[in-house]
């Protein structure tokens, strides 16, 4: 057994019948290298599965995806390609071209270039019109000496020259964590397992959005006690907690309280003697009281 996913069935809740109803099913087929080569998407209609479309994957000898075709059956019950993506790589297995075809309608492509550190430095978007490739827009990327992304400059082609179409900026702390930025951005954290997106449709220089971020190192969490140490004036109760967590410090000064996820993301910061955790999912969290951190369990 290779532990490959072979079937996924999605149910959704019907408010009318007040029960879970079958929505759709995806079944997967793999080659000997455990690469998915077909994914069939079926709908549940009149108590039978009906083919809606299928995804066909092709790989090269380096096990890189070279083609993705999305197909649907015609009235002759034959699979016909509606969408097709073709991928091309350089000798270092870096994606340099992504071409996209929509059935008898249009063709587009994205071209990518990289620096010697393998950072993507440009992304050019073109459309096939009048039997030639025509520029539409591009993004240019700038990095610092630590290969941190500093700026994304968006431009659009006016027909004669490249025009400004927006930009994003990023700053980092001494540990190379992104701590601030502006523009239209996607920020990844928790080892690339989570993301937050900010966007701005106008891309005007005077109307941008931004973010700030705080971090706690995962390796540091192992040393955090579950209860305040002996002699500490801090008391957290109840622990485990289901709703309100109370904080006592032994003084009349209202403490500064920060709440972190177990991955280190800052969830809450306040000056309170209690915090309401009822909206949080069950699990382990980190509470910081006046600079000291403790583990709590939400259940």
Image: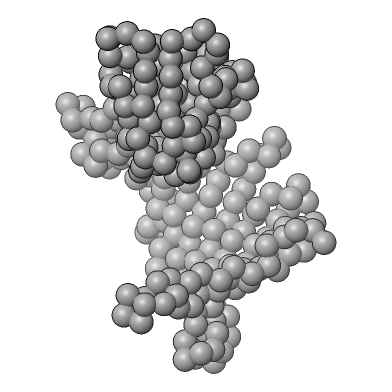
The picture quadrant where one finds residue 15 is bottom left
- Identify the image quadrant of the N terminus: bottom right
Q: Nearer the viewer, residue 182 or 248?
A: 248
Q: Nearer the viewer, residue 9 or 185?
A: 9
Q: Count up the numbered dots.
A: 0
- Coloration mode: one colour
Q: Residue at x 54, y 58 (%)?
A: 85
Task: Answer whether residue 177 is visible to the viewer in this image.
Answer: no
Q: Quick check: 76 above or below 178? A: below
Q: x and y percent of residue 276 in the render?
A: 32, 35
Q: Would residue 51 be found to the left or right of residue 28 on screen?
A: left
Q: Nearer the viewer, residue 294 or 26?
A: 294
Q: Residue at x 28, y 9 (%)?
A: 253
Q: Would residue 154 be found to the left or right of residue 102 on screen?
A: left
Q: x and y percent of residue 226 in the render?
A: 56, 24
Q: Residue at x 48, y 72 (%)?
A: 11
Q: Residue at x 59, y 51 (%)?
A: 87
Q: Quick check: 58 above or below 167? A: below
Task: Answer whether residue 100 is visible to the viewer in this image.
Answer: yes
Q: Would residue 26 be found to the left or right of residue 249 on screen?
A: right
Q: Would residue 79 be found to the left or right of residue 133 on screen?
A: right
């Amino acid at each position: 057994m290779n532990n490959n996913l072979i079937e996924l069935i999605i149910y959704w809740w019907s408010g009318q019948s007040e029960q879970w109803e079958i929505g759709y099913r995806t079944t997967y087929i793999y080659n000997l290298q455990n690469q998915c080569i077909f994914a069939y998407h079926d709908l549940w209609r009149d108590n039978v599965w009906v083919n809606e479309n299928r995804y066909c994957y092709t790989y090269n000898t380096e096990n890189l995806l070279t083609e993705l075709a999305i197909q649907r059956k015609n009235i002759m019950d034959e699979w016909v390609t509606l969408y097709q993506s073709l991928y091309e790589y350089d000798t270092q297995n870096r994606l340099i071209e992504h071409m996209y075809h929509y059935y008898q309608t249009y063709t587009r492509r994205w071209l990518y270039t990289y620096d010697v550190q393998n950072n993507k430095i440009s992304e050019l978007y073109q459309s096939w019109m009048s039997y030639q490739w025509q520029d539409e827009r591009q993004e240019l990327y700038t990095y610092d000496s630590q290969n941190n992304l500093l700026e994304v400059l968006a431009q659009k082609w006016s027909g004669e020259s490249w025009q400004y179409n927006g930009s994003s900026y990023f700053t980092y702390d001494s540990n190379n964590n992104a701590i601030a930025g502006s523009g239209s951005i996607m920020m990844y954290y928790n080892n690339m397992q989570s993301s937050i997106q900010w966007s701005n449709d106008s891309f005007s220089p005077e109307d941008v959005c931004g973010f700030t971020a705080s971090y706690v190192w995962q390796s540091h969490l192992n040393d955090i006690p579950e209860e305040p140490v002996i002699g500490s004036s801090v008391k957290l109760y109840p622990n485990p907690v289901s709703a309100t967590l109370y904080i006592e410090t032994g003084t009349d000064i209202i403490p500064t309280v920060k709440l972190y996820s177990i991955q280190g993301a800052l969830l809450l910061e306040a000056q309170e003697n209690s915090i309401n955790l009822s909206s949080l999912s069950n699990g382990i969290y980190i509470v910081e009281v006046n600079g000291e951190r403790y583990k709590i369990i939400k259940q």
